[in-house]
Image (spheres, rainbow, N blue to C red):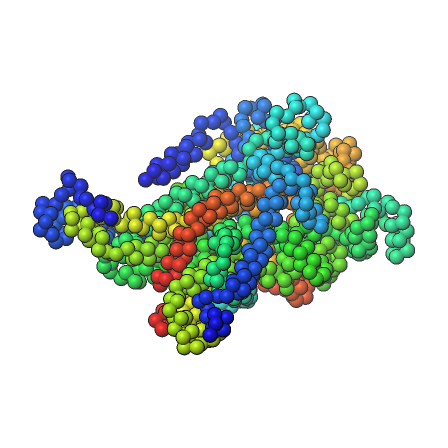
Amino acid sequence: MRRTSMTAIVVALGLTAGTAHAESLTLCWAAWDPANALTELSKDFTAETGIEMKYEFVPWTSFADRFLNELNSQGKLCDLMIGDSQWLGLAAENGHYVKLNDFFEKEGIDINDFLPATVYNYSTWPKGTPNYWALPAMGDALAWVYRKDWFERPEIREAFKKEYGRELEPPKTWSELIEIAKFFTGREIDGKVRYGVAIYTERGSEGITMGVTSALYPWGFRYQDPDKPYHMEGYVNSPEAVEALEAYKELYECCTPPGHSDAYMVANLDAYKSGQVAMQMNWFAFFPGILKDEQVGKVSGFFVNPRQNEEASVLGGQGISVVSYSDKKDLALQYIKWFARPEVQKKWWALGGYSCHRAVLEDPEFPKTAPFAADFLKAMSHVRDFWQEPEYAELLQAMQRRIHDYVVADKGTAKEALDKLIQDWTEIFEDAGKL
Amino acid sequence: MTAADRPRSIVEPRPFSRRLAAVVIVVYALVSAIPLLWIVATSFKTPEDAIAYPPKVFFTPSLEGYVNLFTARTRQTPEYLASLPPPETWYEELVRKRHMVITGPSRFAGRYLNSVIIGFGSTFFAVFLGTLAAYAFSRFRIPLADDLLFFILSTRMFPPVAVAIPIYLMYRKLGLTDSHLGMIILYTAVNLSLSVWLLKGFIDEIPKEYEEAAMVDGYTRLQAFRKVVLPQAAAGIAATAIFCLIFAWNEYAFALLLTSGLAQTAPPFIPNIIGEGGLDWPAVAAGTTLFLLPVMIFTIILRRHLLRGITFGALRR
Amino acid sequence: MNEALTPPEAQRAPSRSAGMPAGHRSGLSDRAVAWLFVAPTIALLLAINIFPLLWNIYLSFTNYKANAPHRPLRWLGLRNYERVLSNEDIWSSMQVTAHFVFWSILLQVLLGFSLAWLLNRRFRGSAFWTTVIVIPMMLSPAVVGVFWSYLFQPQAGIFNYIVNFFHDFGKFTMIGDPDLAPWAIVLVDTWMWTPFVMLICLAGLRAIPEYLYEAAEVDGASSWRQFWTITVPLVLPFLMLAVLFRAIENFKMFDMVVELTSGGPGSATELASIYLKREAFEKWRTGYSAALAVILFVTVFGVANIYVKLLNRVKQR
């Protein structure tokens, strides 16, 4: 019997411990560099309002799982949520986020102060309509990092010129990217064998989809018939899409380091920082951290996602929303009001967060503030996102499976993978009553 | 016939075959222990040593893994670090060397405590209720006893993910998601099938005559149960408790799907300890080691009961 | 023993020496005690196992999605079941599960029995080494999955290092290669659970009465013959029980594989539970996954039922 009373006491202590505090807010996001920057930035908020900020940061690989589960269970853990852009559809339609239109009007926050592309992608649902469910918080896109020092070595430049007949420069097209990757793979530099690229191949959450779309989009991939929504035949499996998918698989098989079959952001960072690869694909979010890195900071260069048939980059980034199940919505809205201020946005960029505010991005000095700033602007001008429908999780999972099966597990052909994907997606849209 | 000529029987192995058996067992034990030893070793490595290629067998030990496990840190610029007062503790010093500052405790201690609360709490209830039910099944004629017992066993056949679907919905309606109470109830129910089954086996072994004699002497059934049966069943109860605790302690699927910030236990937490790039392997290894310790200590202390527990499961059905 | 049986003075029955029949004692009647003891267990199991199962069955006939609870609910009849049974991804997932269950059990039975056989020789220190061998099964399977993913890393992990030490296989990835990954999960599971099978077989071996062997020896039977006519038949029920437990557990397997390979590469190690989790908790197709859960449960239940009848017949022989 002693054990019950002990347990009861411990449980009671645990449960009451949380209630005797000053005001506080809990912000939920992913655990990565920008989150640390936001923690730093938010100290100003606490200094100004006295509201303590608490954080729940979860690694990207479990981020969607954990927080979508949280939202679905109507949990009260999060007051503020910086959710992924693809969650807008389901969050809006299932009442997870607070609609911010009235709040913006009342507080005089003009959504047009933010870059239109970011408003469209991080804030509106239905897409493009003036219904705002989040304030654009973190602009992001997929781009590339490369070993500038290797690219500049005379013997390497000579060898490249001999083999390919042109200078070794950051690639302007995907075909060039693949050539450069092949060139570096197996090459011995400073006594160690190196590889061409680290790309996204992660199976569990969204890794390989993000990676493969960075090839699909430049080839001209379209999700659906522009005149007939949700009709995908001929678009998802168009000849260009097949070509792009085959190119991605080629890149995976020829030029990635061994064991790179389930890699996402941090695996790519690891491979790059440890000197295994000449180039990595990764989110802009990590670039400030890469510059500060002791091993590779001074020798890294950046380039925007190369074109092929057209220019396109994969959209990342998030908006910040108020969770409708929170008991502290007023405090949360205060935070959003504070965050929307131009001075705060400027400091956000300075600390390493990617502000979406026009005062920051349209400042003529902006491209000079960081080596990748100009690339960031370029990327944001032509970003494309995955489906943001409420069924996005199912659509994503289907793509993860089919693409990983083809690229990594060697099943079937590219066309078959895309055909099966259309089947999966059609079923999902039929279930949702959209087809 | 001399002793050496007698046909060899399996009952008395020759010294040679004993030695051979010993060698094979020891080799297997050592090989099987290598992954564990490696993990414990990793918990004392620095993050660079942990991902060194080729793997480092000899390394300078460091407590960074443990410090990283228990603290939340942020990276700062060298200028900021220079402006701070000198570190007061050895772990702050370790962290500063990495150009980082400790911002507070990590979630690990809380998760560990949750494991303790939920693990021990559910074990207690599973054993308590299980003993009662096992006694009843053993001593009384319960209608449909065999079917009920098989039903109880069959509850173990559901994949946890399948069970989690309706439980998730149920808990959502009752407000039990992410609560200690909800998890204790769930784990107790899951452990009950095992505990009833095992304990019935143990109690069946205790002759009924003792308590019947006691009752003839004027004890009530309840008193006879308490004073006669329980002490004799103590070893069986201990064995059952170990199994229940091991299950609740190590459980992952329910914890993953049904808990979040408040009641999450250690198993979903440990594989997600991120360092500056990728998993912080020394911290993950440190968490693994610390999480393993209580169960390992239990096992070593109560190993004889463990064997009895498993074999009773075997002998019963 | 008898000191414990002194009845308390206050509760002395009216006529101690007359041997009053049961029912005339003070205190609860046997029936009341039986009810009191069994009711909480049955109630808890009903609430946590049966009610959710029934709810699951109900959901499997609808198009319910747990992340859109306000959507109008539609009765779909058997449509979810049709979809599940005609889905080739599910069949491939069942194949992966069958491969895993078959090979892991085969290896565990062979290894476990051999180890038990050797341990039965009883050499010095066998208790210590037994404990060492038993430790892996005390760990949390999720944590085991994550740290084996570390051990399997092609550059920094010691698995490749040790294997290449004996014979250079070059740079292979156990968990990145779609052909090797299914064997990786079998290997890790075998490492973890061989001790379990070993302990059960050991119990079985120790339960064999020595006189059987002595009699056989007197009859001049060789040790080979003794093994096949005495040892194997008598250990068989224990072995079959171990196989039953392990098969049920491995059919439900989720934690270890999720942390080790995430079901990848592609879907090379996507076990039934992992597939179910993705459908239920990532895609939130609650109705559909409820149908799958029901099918899985019925399969396990049916097969286990048949197997247990077989096991009982073997026991009686």
Residue at the image point whose x is 64% and y is 32% from the top:
B95
Q: Position of residue A390 (x, y in %)?
A: 54, 50
Toward the viewer: B300 or A410? B300
Q: Position of residue C172 (x, y in %)?
A: 69, 59
Toward the viewer: B279 or B13? B13
Q: Is residue C15 left or right of residue B282?
A: left
Q: Is residue A3 above or below residue A192?
A: above
The quarter of the image holding the N terminus of chain A is: top left
Q: Position of residue C265 (x, y in %)?
A: 62, 59
Q: Position of residue B179 (x, y in %)?
A: 43, 41
The quarter of the image holding the C terminus of chain A is: bottom right
Residue at the image point whose x is 37% and y is 58% from the top:
B312
Q: Is residue A235 above or below residue A194?
A: below
The answer to whether residue C149 shows anywhere in this view is yes
Residue at the image point whose x is 29% and y is 52% from the top:
B133
Residue at the image point whose x is 67% and y is 35% from the top:
A353
Give the total number of marks visible in the rendering: 0
| Residue B91 placement: quadrant | top right
| Residue C174 placement: quadrant | bottom right
Toward the viewer: A46 or C127? C127
The answer to whether residue B273 shows anywhere in this view is no
Q: Is residue A243 left or right of residue A88?
A: right
